Image (cartoon, helix red, strand yellow):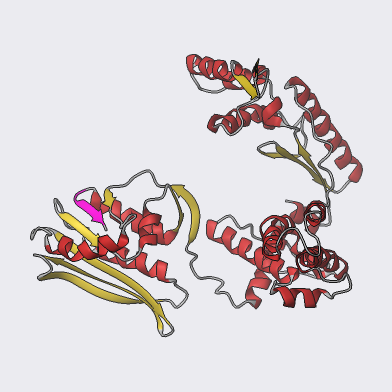
Amino acid sequence: MIERRIAKKGYVLGVFLDIEAAFDNVSFKAIANALSTTKLDPATAHWITNMVATRHITINHKDSTKTIRIKRGCPQGGILSTFLWNLVIDDLLNLSPKDTPGYLQAFADDIVSLAEGNDLDVIWDRTQKTLNTIMKWCTTKDLTISALKTTTKKATASLMQCRKAVGPTWGLTPKTCIWIYKTIIRPIITYCCSIWIRATHTIINTTKLRKVQALALRIMTGAMPSTPFVALNQITNTTDIIPYLQGEAAKSNERLRAYGSLTRERPEHTKGTIKAHVTINNDFVKDLNIPHNSERDLTVPSLNLQSNFTTTTPGDNPDTYRTQLQNIINETPEDWITCYTDGSKTEEGCGAGYIITTNNNNTILHEDSLNLPNSCTVYQAELTAITYACRQLTNYTDKHIIIWTDSLSSINSLTTLITKNNTVKYCLDILNRIGAHNQVELR
């Protein structure tokens, strides 16, 4: 929305707000009122309100015990808490345009207000009116807006805290220091980088970003302050922060594309117009020679609540399981269907295959192999082999079917609660389909 208006030579005034300790401070009255506006039956609504409002906290310290009754807020970490908060803040989002002129959106306790147009005075007035409404709404819910989260130098400040724990001959090891940087500090820098990646096109911004990484690497190595950025990266085998940010932005771009959530803009650009972050990322991906129009395996995460098959894995004694494996196969009843699947990847290519037998492997019902794109992983090849084998089993009913695979990761993926890629999703769907009419085991 912001980019579209700027591209039309207009203005956008954005205000980003954070409600202070929203989950801790929201009043019980606000929760009860929010529940009353839903289609929830009164008895359940009253039960939820009572559960939230009659909580106690007990603190034990040495020989003393103190119990107090909670006067406001939702239980921290409770599954119901986010739902209750969403009901409360939904009241704000549903206010009429007369009260909140412009665009208003919330994610949990973070709120964004956008006002767009061509006249700055009008935009300012609309924004002020929206802010007045938000403040008045917060007052009715016993909430306040946090004024502390306006600007931050969080990455550098966090590093300086770590610096206190490291000396020339004592403190955290280099391995721990680089772990802190890569898992805690660097994610702070890369947050939402797909949106602001264009900022790395200027020297002043790249220098600021490189200084943060240089500080982390100096803490790790004890190097002098005059040590160049490039030398620090080479010594520690750490990717320069700028190409790393560009890579993270490209991955974010491709992830959104796979989810079908990537915003689009018109491909033509005339002199004087801006390029949106989508176009900038697309151009960067083209430079990486990543196939632009090929299908992505990633998909929107979905719950796996159905399982029409059972699984058996080696467990804690894989060696014992292997020694018994041949006996298990030999003792399979003759009328059962047994399927063996495999996937592999070498320098020459990637492929998958399967064979379906019965009568203790003496009768072959189906067998096939197929070549897969070189971009596939062994994990994808293993799952694809199971999927293609199951396609041949869709016409069978009232059979006992055993599917053997040497890929433990495939079995683990098929039994997890959340499915995140299409390869798993396709395999899971067809397993459930044949499992609806047969007794299916995945071993």
Question: Which picture quadrant has residue 290?
Answer: bottom right
List x then y, in percent, for residue 415: 37, 51
Q: Residue at x 31, y 66 (%)?
A: 406
Magenta residues: mostly which secondary structure? strand
Q: Residue at x 43, y 59 (%)?
A: 422
List x then y, in percent, for residue 405: 29, 64
Question: Which picture quadrant has residue 361?
Answer: bottom left
| Lateral position of residue 401 relative to residue 229, left or right | left
The quadrant of the image that shows the C terminus is bottom left
Looking at the rendering, the stretch of residues picked out in magenta corresponds to: 437-442
| Lateral position of residue 335 relative to residue 279, left or right | left
Residue 49 sits above or below residue 177 on the image: above
Q: Nearer the viewer, residue 181 or 277?
A: 181
> Looking at the image, can residue 50 be seen?
yes
Q: Looking at the image, which residue sits at the far bottom?
A: 348
Residue 233 sits above or below residue 348 on the image: above
List x then y, in percent, for residue 430: 30, 56
| Lateral position of residue 274 relative to residue 405, left or right | right
> Looking at the image, can residue 274 be seen?
no
Residue 108 magenta-highlighted: no
Q: Residue at x 64, y 66 (%)?
A: 250
Residue 261 sits above or below residue 109 on the image: below
List x then y, in percent, for residue 64: 66, 19
Number of numbered labels in the structure image: 0
Residue 417 sits above or below residue 426 on the image: above
Question: Which picture quadrant has residue 261?
Answer: bottom right
